[in-house]
Image: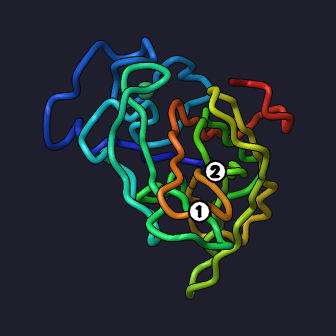
Amino acid sequence: MNRILALPLCAVLTACPGPAGDGSGACSDDTNPAVPNVAPNPGFECGSPPDGWNAPLLGTLEVTAGRTGNAAKVTAKTATQGVVTLVSAEPVAASPLNGTWCASAWLRGTAENAVIVLRRDKGGGSLLDESFFQPLTAEWTKISNSAQLDGTDAKLYVAAGVRAPQKDQVVEVDDVQVWKSTSGRCDER
Ligand SMILES: [Ca+2]
C-alpha cells in the first residue's frame, strides 16, 4: 500500500562510504527491512554538509564527529524564540499517508530544548508540525515522536534541532529514524 521512496542521494551521485547496515558507515539504514527506516542519510555518514538534509533558515549545517561516525551539527545564527532544525530535503513518505508514523533521533548540545518534528504537508502550502520537546543536554539523548495520519497529508518530512536557542548555541543530531508503525506503538525500532 504505502510505497516508500527513500533513495539516498549519495547512492545516486557517488559511492557511499563504509559497509551498509552496521549503522555507522552507511548512507541508508537497512537494519530492519521489515520496518524500513525512511530517514535520508540517517547517520549523516554521507556528504558534507550532509546529503539529504536542508539547513535551518536561522542556522548553519555541517558535519561533525558523531555518536557513530559522523553527526549533523547545527549552529544558531541568531537568538530566536522559534525552532532551529535541520529538515529532510525530500519527503520521507508521500500520499497515501495514514496510520501511525514514528520518529526518533539522538541529540546533544548547548541550547535548552531539543525538538523532533514530523512535518505534515497537506498541499497548497498548508503545513502542520507535530513537535515533541525535551531538555537538551551535553550527553547524547534519544528523543522520540509520533503522529497519527488520517489520509489528508500529501507529504511527510522529518526535522530535528532546538527551540529558542541563543546565538551560536549548537545542537548535534545523529541516528535519525522514521518509520510507519505496524503496531501503532512505535515499538518496532
Ligand atoms: Ca552517525
Q: Mark 1 and 2 residues: CB-CB less than 8 Å, in contact? A: yes
- For this view, does 188 lie left or right of residue 64? right
Estimate the x, y position of residue 151 in percent, counting from the top left.
Answer: 73, 65
Estimate the x, y position of residue 68 in percent, counting from the top left.
Answer: 45, 19
Q: Name the residue under label 1.
A: 166
Q: Which colour scheme is used?
A: rainbow
Q: Label 1 CB, ligand 1: below 8 Å? A: no
Q: Residue at x 58, y 40 (%)?
A: 109
Q: Quadrant of ligand 1?
A: top left
Measure how far apart labels 1 and 2 are at the Cα level.
7 Å
Q: Residue at x 50, y 46 (%)?
A: 4
Q: Residue 34 versus residue 83: which sits nearer the camera?
A: 83
Q: Residue 148 versus residue 139: which sits nearer the camera?
A: 139
| Furthest-left residue in this view | 14
Q: What kind of residue is marked 1? A: Gln
Q: What kind of residue is marked 2? A: Ala
Q: What element carries label 1?
A: loop
Q: Name the residue under label 2.
A: 111
Which quarter of the rendering shows the C terminus? top right
| Furthest-bottom residue in this view | 124
Q: Residue 114 versus residue 165: which sits nearer the camera?
A: 165
Q: Residue at x 38, y 59 (%)?
A: 60
Estimate the x, y position of residue 180 in percent, counting from the top left.
Answer: 68, 41
Question: How many marks do you count on the picture?
Answer: 2
Q: Which residue is drawn at 53% across and 22% down?
A: 33
Q: 43 above or below 3?
A: above
Callout 1 environment at 10 Å: few (<14), some (14 to 19), or many (20+)? Answer: some
Q: What element carries label 2?
A: loop
Q: Earlier in the sequence, mark 1 or mark 2?
A: 2
Q: 186 above or below 61?
A: above
- For this view, does 110 lie left or right of residue 14? right
Q: Label 2 CB, ligand 1: below 8 Å? A: no
